[in-house]
Amino acid sequence: MAGRTWDESDVRVRANKRGSRPRTKQRPAHEDAVVARVVAVDRGRYTCVADEDRADSRTVLCVRAKELRRQPIVPGDLVGVVGDVTGAPDTLARIVRIEPRTTVLRRSADDTDPVERVIVANADRLVLVLATASPTPRTGFVDRGLVAAWDADITPVVCMTKADLADPTEFLSHLHDLDVLTISTQRATERGERPEAGRHEESLAISEESLAELRELLDGHISVFLGPSGVGKSTLVNALTGSERATGGVNDVTGRGRHTSSSALALTVPGTRPGTWVVDTPGIRSLGLAHVSEENLLDSFTDLVPATAHCPRGCLHTADSPGCALDAWVRRPEASPAAPERLESLRRLLAALRGVMQGGDSEKRLGQAIT
């Protein structure tokens, strides 16, 4: 052995337990990936539309790549797709990347839940849908929706449905001092008859005048419809897009809508410019704002922000904060009649974010402001 010459054949290498070829963290760039828009998500399958702006657009069913398993993919997302992107039956493509998002609309289960839930991506309009009656509209939901929209840099729109049942003017006065787009829709009735407020005639079609005004407002935008169950979101979407989303009425005992839609769905609007989408979402019971900072929350109440310049440094803006200028601001002769209610809403939301339940608060759970 003393005179033996050693070479590489004498070196023993233990085989990799996970395979003979070590894995690398480098991933292919997929420069040839086709960009498509996600329009629906269902149990690990993603329905995407490729070449959406062209007449020969196609619908492609996809799964996500393993490296994206921890990233949420939601309707509105633009994604890179590889594989069979022809959209032929029984084919499956793969999502390999998520394109940068312009906006992200989020919510949490309540105002103390640290887990954010992405509702839709790349939307530029949030349509808060409420009914003038059946179910009764709540200003608390509107205030929360406006905060969520402005925090996400999305233009809010308040849409009041069933204007044939009640006049929405009084409710919309809550937004008198705000730069918010509002629109009302009503259902077409035979011989111009006004339906009774207690009747839930979901079969009635939306009037053509209402649809034309709403279609013009949404033209060229990606709009997400958000609201409680039973207010007519899916009915509006069906009328605008020609789809057949399930619709339901209102429970006569509880006064709440019946939950019909189970997932968000993006649809095109015929008669509008390319790139016009509406996203119908399931009815929600709560709109938590745990992801919104106190500063952004306060900035969303644009009618009250000027008063904070007269507040002392570090003011918490509560009812018992020494020197808080908000109370005097809403009592001014020129202040809107809705200003005191808006201040109460602001303080309720601030208390919820701070984890403090106000005495006499009607909300049984933090973040539950629409029931």
Image: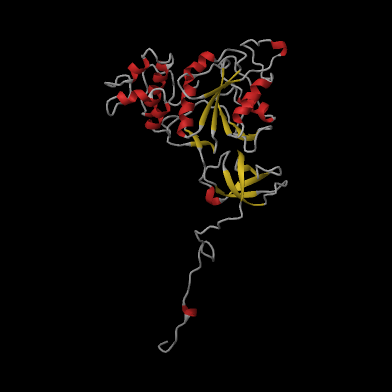
Between residue 24 and residue 8, name the one nearer to us: 24
**Dividing the image into 4 quarters, which one contains the N terminus?**
bottom left
- In this rendering, the count of numbered labels is 0
**Residue 172: percent from the left, percent from the top?**
51, 17
**Residue 5: percent from the left, percent from the top?**
44, 86
Q: Residue at x 66, y 10 (%)?
A: 194
Q: Return the residue found at the far front.
A: 334
Q: Quadrant of residue 57?
A: top right
Give the colour scheme of this rendering: secondary structure
Residue 145 visible? The answer is yes
Q: Return the residue found at the far bottom.
A: 3
Between residue 255 and residue 157, name the one nearer to us: 157
Q: Residue at x 41, y 17 (%)?
A: 339
Q: Quadrant of residue 290?
A: top left
Q: Residue at x 47, y 74 (%)?
A: 12
Q: Quadrant of residue 308?
A: top left
**Residue 307: percent from the left, percent from the top?**
34, 23
**Residue 137: percent from the left, percent from the top?**
53, 18
Q: Is residue 238 above or below residue 334?
A: below
Residue 245 visible? The answer is no
